[in-house]
Image: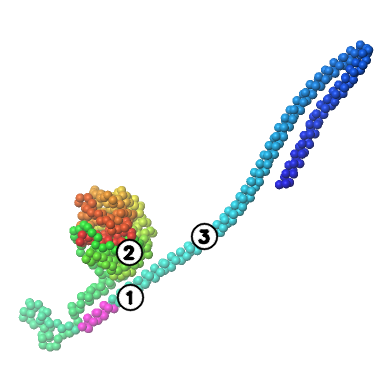
Amino acid sequence: MAAVTETWRRHIVGQLKHRDLNQHHRFQDLIRFYTRLLEKTSLTKGILSCSVRRPSSDRSSVSSLLHQNNDLKKTTGELAYQVLELQQQIKIKECVLEEQRARRVEDGSRLEGALGARRVLQRRVETVQEENGALKRKYDELLELQRREETKLREETVRGEHLLEDLIHLKTQAAAHMNSRNQRRSRAREANLLKELQTAARSKVTVDSCSSAPTSRSASPKSDPQQAWTDGGPVRRFRSLSASSPRILSSFRDLFDRKRRGHSVCSLEEDLVFPVRFSSSARVPVRALQVLEAHEQGINAVRFSSSCQLLATGGTDREIKLWEVRSGSLTHRSTLDGSTEGITCIEFDPAGFRILAASYDKSALLWRLDDSVPKLTLTGHSRKVTAARFSGLHQVVTGSADRTIRLWDLQRAACVKVVEVSSYCSDLVCCENSVISGHFDSKIRVWDSRTERCVQELLVQGKVTSLDISSDQRQLLSCCRDDCLQLVDLRGRSNERVCFRADGFKCGSDSSKAVISPDGCFLAAGSADGAVYIWNVSTGNLETRLPDRHSSSISAVAWSMSGEYVVSVDKSRRAVLWSDI
């Protein structure tokens, strides 16, 4: 900084010397003329003084002197004018110099300001360089962190692939273990059967031919050789299947049917034809008989068995719990495990021996009620399975968020048909030769299960959250996100619809489920405010509202086939049993 100041001072001194030299050269002529003028003036004064002292000089010399005097006066005037001009020029030059001096001072101050700004900018440059260095170091650290994270991601990806392989291997082992256990059970049953057959073969039975023969035969004139042998000699001993218990006959039938079916996953009881159950008149519930915390997490699905003696609930805790319905109360019977994620839908088979469930783990699972381990796991969907229904004794239909509907053969444990749909499937129901599905594109589609074609589309006003079909399969109930329940008449081509709404009713989620009473006279649905709403189908009005038992949105409602009970479940683990008892 001192070196810069010294350089600036030397520059100013040099400029001042240069200015003095220029001005000296400019006024040299003026000084010379002024000196001459002074000399001439002194000379004129001397001549005049001489003329005064010598009055007797000649007239000619006087005239010449006067002439010279006039010339001198004229010269003096000219010189005085030049002096004035030069003085004016000097003043102008001085003004110019003052202006230059002022500009120099101003330039000096501006220079000082520029130097100060330069110093500030230099400091800013240094600061920015330091910040850039810090940012560069941080950027390098982030790059290194990114490389490490990418390495970890690759390692985790490889680990995930290995875990997936291990999971597949474990599932394969579990399936093999299940098959081995089933085979052991089958061999054990066969061994027990053989023991019973051997016991029955070794048993000795005395047959009284007189008492066992018909009256018409005893009146015949011909005698029976067997009768004579019995009466006249020792009693005949023989093997009789009629003497064995009914269990032996059922074991025979089971053995022959098993041989006939080969490796079918269906049992004898599941192959039996059961009579159609006629539902009794439904009763409108008025009070809560029991409130219980049924699961450890939220409950998504609830369903009564066809016998009305069992209730199944499925929740986010990946379990299905079976409850016995006795005298207006629910008693826990057993828990079905096997799903790796939450349950979305539950269905009992018509015979009442099996239960089917849809899961978030992209599969549907089948249990026997007497076994907590799944008998079948149906995999093939790429997203969660939202609905699973029996379409026959040995067939199951599933709908998924992957926009497909699949038909499964339980005897082969395989998918036999896949139907692509243009929208998320939220629920489905089955009737004779048809599958009806509800979707998030506000459409209900009717599929012909024989041709796999959509034969009809019904447009609604919102996302379809659930479907239910009446016991006589004449009416279809849909629950939608527009807070409306629609009852569709399936008997005619016009598909007449009736809309049911109520003040305060609001569909709580995209999976809220509504039901039709077993006699088709009432509709029930849970609301987001925790109340159960029941409508009268014949009048179209709200029949009753059941509040104050749920603390969160109701996810599903079930009505027993006897018409006596209604159960509602919610997202806060609570199940409520309603009735008019």
The foreground one among 399 and 126 is 126
* Amino acid type for the residue under numbered disc 3: Glu
Is 136 displayed left or right of 176 in the figure?
right
Name the front one of labels 2 and 1: 2
Q: Name the residue under label 3.
A: 150
- Magenta-drawn stretch contains 200: yes
User: Is residue 410 visible to us here?
Assistant: no
The foreground one among 65 and 125 is 65
Image coordinates of residue 539 in percent, x first then y, are: 20, 50
Q: What stretch is highlighted in magenta?
A: 191-203
Q: What element carries label 2?
A: loop
Q: Is mark 1 on a helix, strand or loop?
A: helix
* Amino acid type for the residue under numbered disc 2: His
Name the front one of labels 2 and 3: 2
Tell me the CA gap for discs 2 and 3.
Answer: 41 Å
Residue under the image location 10 percent in, 86 percent down: 231
